[in-house]
Amino acid sequence: MMQIQEQRNGNLLITGMDPEMSAFMKDMIVSLLDVDDDNPEYPEFDEWSELVPMTRINEVIPTTYIRSGVYKIYHNNHVIYIGETRCDGTVVSRKGMWSRRSDFRSTVQSNGKVKNPYGNAVKFLELYGKEELYNVSHAFHYVHPKYCKEAELQLLKEYHAQHDTLPALQSEIDYKRVG
């Protein structure tokens, strides 16, 4: 049974459709309401942000960081984690890639004693220690939410092919994903 739900951000969520009905509904909406068919392209990974050091705080957050995408965490300019977030900044409390950076920072600064410790940050504490937080930086790359998981996996596979291992903070699940 199909259900439609209006969300707080103004979006409509329709669930319970088979693929044929979904395609039909999309075509109807596009033709009746004269809207753009949002069919984003898969990203090219040629325009990463600059490295944003953990020492950068209390500054205006660039809007491109408050979006969905993939990101890399660096320690002393070496990649130690590759991750993604599909949160596109429409949820007020979750500011996309920047929120992942904040989760990492708060977990490390508290020595893992936050309500929901961030797994890669706990591993960072084990491998490097809290005092090394200031040698950490992040790079961000916008990716449409539709492609975030796929893009993350592509980056992990490329890293693995080049280094014959994954970045230090990746989990065992990531090793299984890259095959």
Image (cartoon, grey):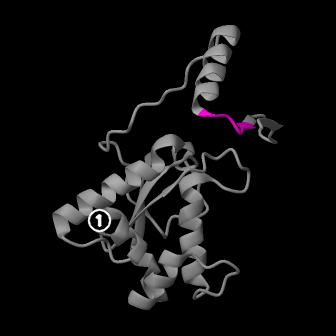
**Can you see residue 60?**
no
Residue 65, given in percent of the width and then of the height, sits at: 53, 50
Residue at 38% x, 69% y is 174
Q: Amino acid at mark 1?
A: Gly
Identify whether 41 is placed above or below 152.
above
The residue depicted at 67 percent of the width and 34 percent of the height is 17
Please state if 30 lies on the left or on the right of 162 as rendered.
right
Q: Where is residue 102 drawn, in percent x and y?
A: 59, 67
- Confirm whether residue 119 shows in the render: yes
Closer-to-camera residue (81/175):
175
Q: Residue 115, position in %: x, y?
A: 70, 80
Q: Is residue 84 left or right of residue 177?
A: right
Closer to us: 109 or 17: 17
Q: Is most of the magenta stretch helix, strand or loop?
A: loop
Residue 173, position in %: x, y?
A: 42, 72
The C terminus lies in quadrant: bottom left
Residue at the spot of label 1: 179
Quadrant housing residue 169: bottom left
From this view, report whether residue 61 is shown above or below residue 143. below
- What stretch of residues is rendered in magenta? 14-18
